Amino acid sequence: MSGILVFALHYEGAYNKNSLGGVSEAAKLAGELGAEAHAVVVGDVSDELAAQLGNHGVTKVFRAKDVPEGLAQPVVDVMAKVMDDNGHDYALFGGGLLGFEIGAGLAARLNAGVTMEVTKVNVVDGKLEAERPIHGDSSISTSKYKDRGIIIGRLNAFETAPPSDASAEVEDVDVELSPFSTKATMVQRGEARGEDIDIEGADILVAGGRGLGKPEGFELCEELAEALGGAVAATRAVVDAGWYPYSTQIGQTGKTVSPKLYLAAGISGAIQHKVGFQSSENIVAINKDSNAPIFEYSDLGIVGDLNKILPKLTQAVKAKKG
Amino acid sequence: LKICVLVKEVPDAAVEKRINPATGRMDRGGERNLNPYDTHAIEAAMQVREGGVVEVDEIVAVTMGPETSVRALHKAVSLGADRSVHLSDDALAGSDVAATGYALAKVLERESPDLVLLGQQSDDGECYTIGAVVADHLKMPSLTQVIKMDVTEGKLRCERQAEYGYDTVEIELPAVISVGDAINEPRYPSLKAIMGAKKKPLDAVGVGDVGIDGTMVGEAGSKVICGEFKPPPQKAAGEIIEDEDTNETVQKIVAWLDERKLLA
């Protein structure tokens, strides 16, 4: 059989949205292959929560209870064993940091082919083929696998199917962890740094990146956001640097938004950020570097100094709105 | 403590990124340089050395790639590495991520480092997964996208942002750590260091020198068949304004927003 094994990340009793997308995609593809999709969960997962993955199309859930959560290498041990014991030909991951780490480790362990940042998977002649944008999304390449294949999705690449009332069989697995998999210990998980700001409901977002130059640069964004009646968002680089709260971060390991207007100030627009806002209705970019990737996909791009432009824009917006 | 830093040569984004007029696509040929993300890994190694908590015996830059990759090694040495190792062999051409990680792991095995550092992702769009591949072959614990790393005797305390916020993870050495660019501000090399870089020891090795199984690398040893390139769905090109007169620019932006009823 050419089954697909998918990893489902959970936290505080709920599944990760990208994981559910991965589960749905695996189930859909397995259907086309005439095979089954199964899921792996680790750690503290109730019978009910585990079986619930059946809602999204997997027929069986392998649960490794004593395996630590939030670290990749123990999950590699579990998935490698489950795939070897059950003959899965493919492993699939929804977008997200842990999926990248687990998928890559699993490829090394199983001597399998791996493709990351996958945006689409097709069934061709009874096998999976993965499409992946390369070179700053200027081209799409197709990966085929000589043997087993590991497919790691880009953030938001796979949509979660509407849940059915199907339930999955839950099988507990005992896996002996590799000695090196136990040498990393989670001391603290999921610390939210900075205040909790809700940006997901905003119709207009003014986002700031490293190009603001300093933390105080966000004041310019806040003033413009207020004039526009919107909220302020940030890139990972400035959140990691402590300039703005984690709750406002857009992109990989942050939030995904699709407002009516996304105005990006001092943001180069790397893929990891782009995936978090690319479905916005209107994208406006202000950046002094005319080579910034964001100009390749913005609807309106302004090449110039944001320190000059933002204050005047705030004034002009206020004047226009009266 | 011995630290190996994995580095990679990539197209020089700042200098050479331009659109090829014939294809309308990004032209990424031309000048190549050290992957900017890797400079953070070298800086992290230097800060461990200068931090004074543990004694660093040696910092070794390691790369795999064609002849030109020597430039990336020289840059790495000018930024603080003591010497470098260049894995280069025709047999490696066409290696995928898994094969590349395996080959690099074989070089590292020979060096037997206590800590392997690398940049969180390559600037040329490949694999921010290489650290995890290398770690599995070396049987070492690993963490990627680390933005804070404290070293104590035999142990690291790392912080990174994951799916649900910031995680703090303790890791026993030896370990493989990919650092994020927020971890530090890389220093600029001094002129003396740039001039001296070519004189530091550079060990050129081939597949046979480090015990790489030839059936595991190159196009034949790779498990992914890559190909059938096609253009992405086209999106209409956006309007670009070069800001010369800011008052005028701002009026244009306001008009654009107003047209789309975004100022209601």
Image (cartoon, rainbow, N blue to C red):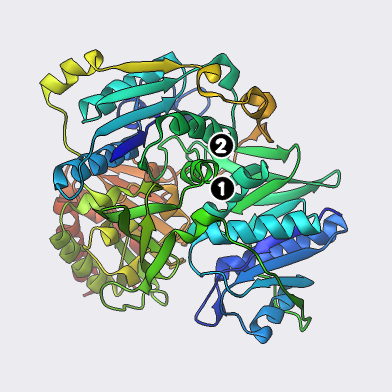
Q: Quadrant of the C terminus of chain A?
A: bottom left
- SS for tag 1? helix
Q: Position of residue B115 (x, y in %)?
A: 35, 43
Which residue corresponds to the image point at 84% horizontal and 55% vertical from the top-left? Answer: A33
As measured in the structure, the alpha-carbon distance from the residue carrying label 1 to the one carrying label 2 is 9 Å
Q: Chain of mark 1?
A: A
Q: Does residue B204 appear in this view? A: yes
Which quarter of the image is occupied by the N terminus of chain A?
bottom right
Residue A264 at x, y percent in the picture: 32, 56
Q: Which mark is residue A289?
A: none
Mark 2 — residue? B97
Secondary structure type for disc 2 = helix
Answer left or right for B168 relative to B66. left
Nearer-the-camera pick, B99 or A254 = B99
Q: Disc 2 sits on a residue from what chain?
A: B
Taking the spot 29% from the left edge, 47% from the top edge, the residue there is A302
Residue kind at label 2, given as amino acid type: Val
Q: Residues within 10 Å of mark 1 (few under 14, many from 20)?
A: many
Q: Is residue A129 above or below residue B206?
A: below
Q: Which residue is labeled 1 in the image?
A: A104
Please provide percent x and percent y for residue A314.
19, 64
The answer to which image quadrant residue B260 occupies is: bottom left
Residue A227: % across, % down: 23, 72
Is there one chain holding both mark 1 and mark 2?
Answer: no
Tell me if label 1 and label 2 are in contact, CB under 8 Å. yes
- Between residues A75 and A278, which one lies in front from this camera angle? A75
Residue closer to the observer: A218 or B220: B220
